[in-house]
Image (cartoon, rainbow, N blue to C red):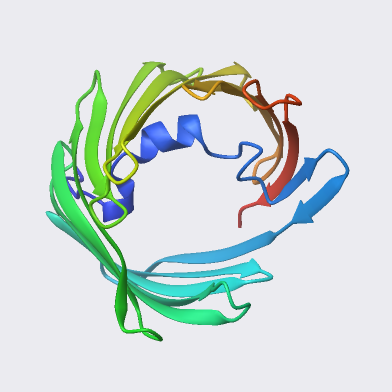
Amino acid sequence: MNSSPGIYFDIGKKARDVLYKDYAQLSPLHFQYQCFKYNCKLSCHVGEVLPGLGTLFRVIIPDSGKAELRYLHEYAGIAAGVGLKPNPTGGCDAIADFSGALGSDLFSIGTNISFDISTRTFNNLDTGLSLNTAFLTASLTLDDKFDTLKASCYHSFNPLSKTAVAAEFWHSFSTNTTGVALGTQHALWPFTLVKARVDSSWKIGTLVRQELWQRFFIAIAGEVDFMAINKLSKLGFSVGFNL
């Protein structure tokens, strides 16, 4: 039995996937009325270069890239990487990331540190913990240099049909704002996944993800902001291929 806690970004991942993965605001291609914006995300993950050691290479065209090493032990997971991220001046900053998680597949605690090499400042500081049971997966994190508190939970009703619900609560200490997001997913057929989400700002999103072949899929997502004056809408389309 594998008791590894994974890496830090596995904390809360199941809930994030239900609530945010492949939706219009995150899709590689998205449309906003007559505006067209795009990005292309390419990644390569080699599972084990050496026992327990894996690599990840990621490029997001046109503005960023990252190379990362991951080491998974029975009771620990460590990830370290260097990448480029755009800055407000139009250039790119070199960012070094380090994260670690301790525990097991039942309970884990971890932290993530992001350091801007160009300005010699900490870009981000995060910490969190996760509890994983057969009934419920829950997480609690402090993100954005400990400014944002997030709590999430995930429950799977039927793994065969991928039926699940998720919820996330967040509070920003600097702006004193609070929000909640609720989401659900269900596989209508073995290769067709439908998702829906709503948050406390009355943004409602839906998504249909269709696997065409074993490793090729497309996703179409839409989002409506009912609090916007003109009922701002987004439509997203993404294509994915896994080797």
Q: In this image, 193 relative to 93: left or right?
A: right
Relative depth, front residue between 141 and 119: 119
Q: In this image, 32 relative to 69: left or right?
A: right
> What x and y, as percent, mark residue 46?
45, 67
Q: Quadrant of residue 76?
A: bottom left
Considering only vertical position in the picture, is 92 above or below 52?
Answer: below
Residue found farthest to the right: 34
> What x and y, as percent, mark residue 48?
36, 68
Q: In this image, 210 relative to 47: left or right?
A: right
Tell me what residue is drawn at x 42 percent, y 37 percent.
Answer: 16
> What x and y, as percent, mark residue 165?
42, 18
Give the quadrant of the N terminus. Answer: top left
Tell me what residue is drawn at x 33 percent, y 51 percent.
Answer: 9
Residue 73 in sight here = no
Considering only vertical position in the picture, is 56 above or below 227?
Answer: below
Q: Quadrant of residue 238?
A: top right
Give the quadrant of the C terminus. Answer: bottom right
Considering only vertical position in the picture, is 141 above or below 146?
Answer: above
Residue 35 in sight here = yes
Relative depth, front residue between 224 and 78: 224
Relative depth, front residue between 176 and 171: 176
